[in-house]
Image (cartoon, rainbow, N blue to C red):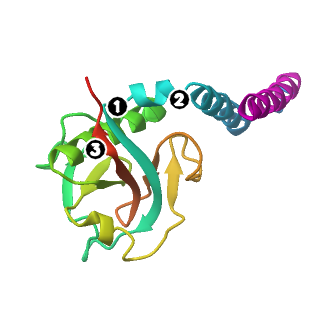
Amino acid sequence: MQVIASSLLLLSIIAVSHARLQRNSKRETKDERKKVNTLFEDLEEAENPIKLHSICEVNYEKVGCFKEDTNNRTLSQELFQDRMSSDPNYSGQRVDWANYNTYLKSLACRCAKSSALNGFTYFGLQDYGRCFSDPHASTSYSRHGNSSHCFNQYFYSCDDNAYGQCMGRGKEVNYIYHITVHGMQDA
């Protein structure tokens, strides 16, 4: 009941904000529109948790943003990457910059699947399209400390408690995920 009331309050705040933005459409910026759209999408996902689970056959949860050292990696194995077709770890799928919000969900799911198939329980996303993991990631991912250089599917700072996926900026930051106890969902 409290969740419904909170959701209705949030929805009314968003609706009022959206109406105000519509009235001031001449002054409305692209960032303001994107923020409102992000709030609507987060609300939709929060109201429909089944939608979140239907995205991927592997259950995973957000852990946080952590520093990486390319000379002493916490996640030593690049499982695949979508950035450079000439690289041996290229997955065959290019980063979809025009639809990055959808692409990031797909990337996280593919990385979770690949990690689970290798018996790993943690994985990290970095550099806009790279998937890393390691057999000892559960104890090593935080070795170099926390970072604030992660972003969400709309390139805003990542909120560990919000719905949606996150990514580490560049090669020296991982956004870490944990594959939950249930791992692979039943097909």
Q: Earlier in the sequence, mark 1 or mark 2?
A: 2
Give the total of numbered labels: 3
Q: Quadrant of residue 23?
A: top right
Residue 60, magenta (yes or no) = no
Callout 1 touching callout 2 (CB < 8 Å): no
Relative image position of residue 40 (x, y in whole percent): 67, 28
Between residue 173 and residue 51, name the one nearer to us: 51
Q: Is residue 135 above or below residue 153?
A: below
Q: Is residue 119 above or below residue 77?
A: above
The residue shown at (86%, 27%) is 16
The residue beneath circle 1 is 56
Residue matched to label 3? 111
Q: Which residue is mark 2?
A: 49
Mark 2: which secondary structure? helix
Left or right of 76? Residue 153 is right
Against 187, residue 103 (above or below) is below
Q: Tag 1: residue type?
A: Cys
Of badges 1 and 2, the one in the foreground is 2
Q: Give the percent coordinates (x, y) of residue 134.
A: 22, 61
Which residue occupies 79% across, 30% down?
Answer: 5
- Where is 153 relative to 122, above or below? above
Q: Which residue lies at the image location 65% right of the left edge and 34% below the top edge?
A: 34
Left of 47 or right of it: where is 176?
left
Seen from this angle, which residue lies furthest front?
1
* Residue 116 locus on image (x, y percent): 22, 45
Name the magenta segment's main secondary structure. helix
131 or 43, nearer to the observer: 43
